[in-house]
Image (cartoon, rainbow, N blue to C red):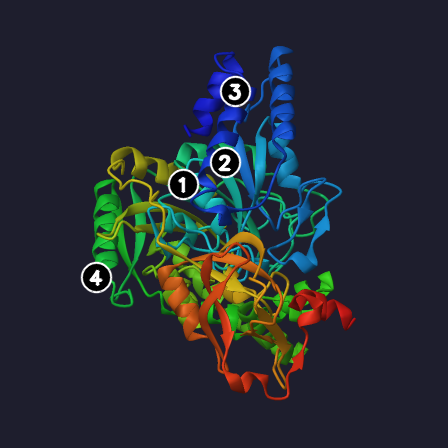
């Protein structure tokens, strides 16, 4: 996928048709699904994509000037698109939007072509991209590693060349960390500069809509269309005169060693980025960033957690439907009182006053976007602590009403990406874009590894009960990027039992020559993910070999003899799902 600017120039001039560009985008998206189907939650029907492109061509033919003519794009699925479901990666919360989010409507009117809605950490709660029932997209250069969240699918869609740009959102870093992990630009505007009308909130007072692009000029182009006051959004703000950053600028850098959690390559890449900025004319200003990091703790260890709880309550979602990690976070919000909220607000105001003083001495603050990167399997094993590590240098930015742009800063030896963030005061957005463009122009990072397009070593797993789609333990598969292969049946030599005293309710599958065929679902997992999944299987269940109706043998759930003590024989129902339905 070439840049949005190139596409627009070609389509606007008549050198290419928007419908040709759209057809190519559809073909790329189809091809990449074989590698990472987890990118998308919903695709726009191909005929609708092509028709939208034809309309753009017609408008161009009438002499209209469309700033985004024919540019294919994607949107995170916590943003409304008229006529499409919005899920926020929680199927139980899905609703069909009657109108598009304000920002999306602007992009469509400007001639952009929507390809689909992308995956995310459920309810935009996370920086890892694994907290979704739709699977876990990996870093495009090394798919063993997280793509970053919560805007995981949007970042991968751009980095893999499926679209020219994609919208994400950012409450704690979700528009920046995925950019760092996929060698992208991630623009996080000042709060209220882009309307959040039509956004499913995470923390309504902090949320921003963001954009991922391959270069800064594309980010500036999208920003020129998307930004602007929206009367319908109570959090929208009138823009004052834009702040400026001169050719010589004061660059704030931490005055003590940063925490990279043992990642020496990240530390070296950060130093190299700092050296590049110094060559651009930066005056280095040592800054104490400890108050900023202390402020960041308010987001998940203070009453702002309750704002996430309130957002989900407003949607009427049963907490039982939530991903377990998301549920743990939002249920933690219930412990905060109104008094706690005011006390937290007073603390924040003190931190804000301290932050305001920063901008009297510097123009820009430089920090790592994320201090390191983790494998998907490592995040699944330690979900809260590793997620917190990734947000160390991002969580404070929206709390303190700052603007930011994440830019690439190199690769580690394992082909994972590192990035840095240029942070400014509120309304420094345009100046940050200009500085990032200078950085990009003088230090282009064109030497990068190939996309990871190797078929992954995989194991097929059969599940018969609580891991089926829509069942309580399905997240143990989806969070490991398990790929659904389809429904199937066992050979006619099994019996199914509802185990006694099992929480959540679970069946036991037992071989019996006098048995029957039992309905099941087949999934494909990577070898490492399969290993971590097996480690979570509790006795008296185990993973063994199951024979399917066609004679194929796959790995699947089997039961120790003790699993049948007090169990009910439910073979006559033909499967767990039918048995559960019989009970309602």
Most foreground residue, 222 or 91: 91
Q: Is residue 303 visible?
A: no
Mark 1, residue position: 159
Numbered disc 2: secondary structure: helix
Mark 3 or mark 4: name the one nearer the start of the chain: 3
Front disc: 1 or 4: 1
The CA distance from mark 3 to mark 4 is 46 Å
Q: Which numbered tag is attached to residue 20? A: 3
Front disc: 4 or 2: 2
10 Å crowding of disc 1: few (<14), some (14-19), many (20+): many
Depicted 319 relative to depicted 487: above or below: below
In the picture provided, is 141 more to the left or to the right than 472? left
Seen as rendered, the residue at the extreme front is: 514
Q: Is residue 183 visible?
A: yes
Q: Which numbered tag is attached to residue 30? A: 2
Mark 3 or mark 2: name the one nearer the start of the chain: 3
Mark 4, residue position: 264
């Amino acid at each position: 996928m070439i840049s949005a600017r190139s596409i627009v120039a070609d389509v606007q001039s008549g050198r290419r048709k928007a419908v040709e560009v759209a057809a190519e985008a559809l073909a790329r998206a189809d091809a990449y699904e074989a590698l990472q189907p987890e990118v998308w939650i919903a695709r726009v029907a191909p005929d609708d994509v092509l028709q939208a492109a034809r309309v753009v061509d017609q408008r161009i033919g009438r002499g209209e000037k469309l700033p985004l003519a024919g540019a294919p794009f994607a949107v995170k699925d916590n943003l409304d698109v008229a006529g499409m479901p919005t899920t926020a990666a929680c199927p139980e919360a899905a609703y069909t939007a009657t109108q598009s989010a304000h920002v999306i409507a602007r992009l469509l009117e400007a001639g952009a072509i929507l390809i689909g809605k992308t995956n995310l950490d459920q309810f935009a709660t996370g920086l890892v991209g694994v907290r979704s029932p739709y699977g876990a997209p990996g870093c495009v250069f090394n798919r063993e590693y997280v793509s970053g969240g919560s805007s995981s699918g949007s970042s991968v869609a751009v980095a893999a060349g499926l679209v020219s740009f994609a919208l994400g959102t950012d409450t704690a870093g979700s528009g920046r960390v995925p950019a760092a992990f996929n060698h992208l630009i991630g623009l996080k505007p000042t709060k209220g500069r882009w309307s959040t009308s039509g956004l499913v909130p995470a923390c309504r007072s902090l949320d921003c809509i963001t954009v991922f692009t391959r270069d800064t000029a594309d980010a500036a182009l999208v920003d020129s269309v998307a930004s602007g006051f929206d009367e319908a959004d109570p959090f929208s703000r009138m823009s004052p005169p834009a702040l400026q950053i001169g050719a010589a600028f004061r660059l704030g850098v931490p005055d003590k060693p940063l925490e990279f959690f043992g990642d020496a390559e990240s530390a070296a890449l950060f130093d190299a980025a700092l050296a590049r900025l110094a060559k651009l004319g930066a005056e280095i200003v040592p800054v104490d960033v400890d108050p900023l990091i202390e402020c960041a703790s308010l987001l998940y260890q203070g009453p702002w957690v309750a704002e996430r709880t309130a957002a989900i309550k407003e949607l009427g979602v049963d907490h039982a439907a939530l991903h377990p990690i998301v549920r743990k976070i939002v249920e933690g919000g219930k412990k905060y009182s109104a008094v706690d909220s005011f006390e937290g607000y007073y603390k924040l105001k003190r931190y804000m006053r301290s932050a305001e003083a920063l901008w009297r001495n510097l123009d820009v603050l430089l920090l790592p976007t994320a201090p390191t990167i983790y494998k998907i399997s490592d995040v699944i094993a330690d979900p809260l602590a590793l997620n917190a590590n990734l947000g160390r240098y991002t969580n404070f930015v929206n709390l303190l009403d700052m603007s930011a742009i994440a830019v690439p800063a190199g690769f580690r030896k394992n082909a994972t990406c590192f990035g840095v963030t240029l942070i400014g005061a509120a309304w420094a957005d345009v100046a940050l874009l200009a500085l990032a463009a200078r950085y990009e122009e003088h230090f282009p990072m064109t030497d990068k590894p190939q996309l990871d397009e190797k078929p992954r070593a995989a194991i097929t797993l059969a599940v018969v009960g609580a891991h089926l789609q829509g069942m309580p333990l399905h997240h143990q598969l989806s969070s490991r990027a398990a790929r659904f292969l389809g429904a199937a049946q066992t050979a006619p030599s099994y019996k199914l039992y509802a185990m006694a005293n099992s929480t959540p309710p679970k069946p036991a599958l037992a071989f019996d020559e006098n048995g029957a065929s039992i309905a099941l679902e087949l999934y494909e997992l990577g070898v490492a993910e399969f290993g971590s999944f097996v480690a979570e299987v509790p006795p008296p269940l185990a993973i063994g070999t199951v024979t399917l109706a066609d004679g194929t043998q796959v790995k699947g759930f089997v039961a120790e003899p003790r699993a049948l003590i007090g169990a009910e024989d439910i073979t006559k129902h033909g499967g767990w799902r039918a048995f559960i339905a019989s009970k309602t």
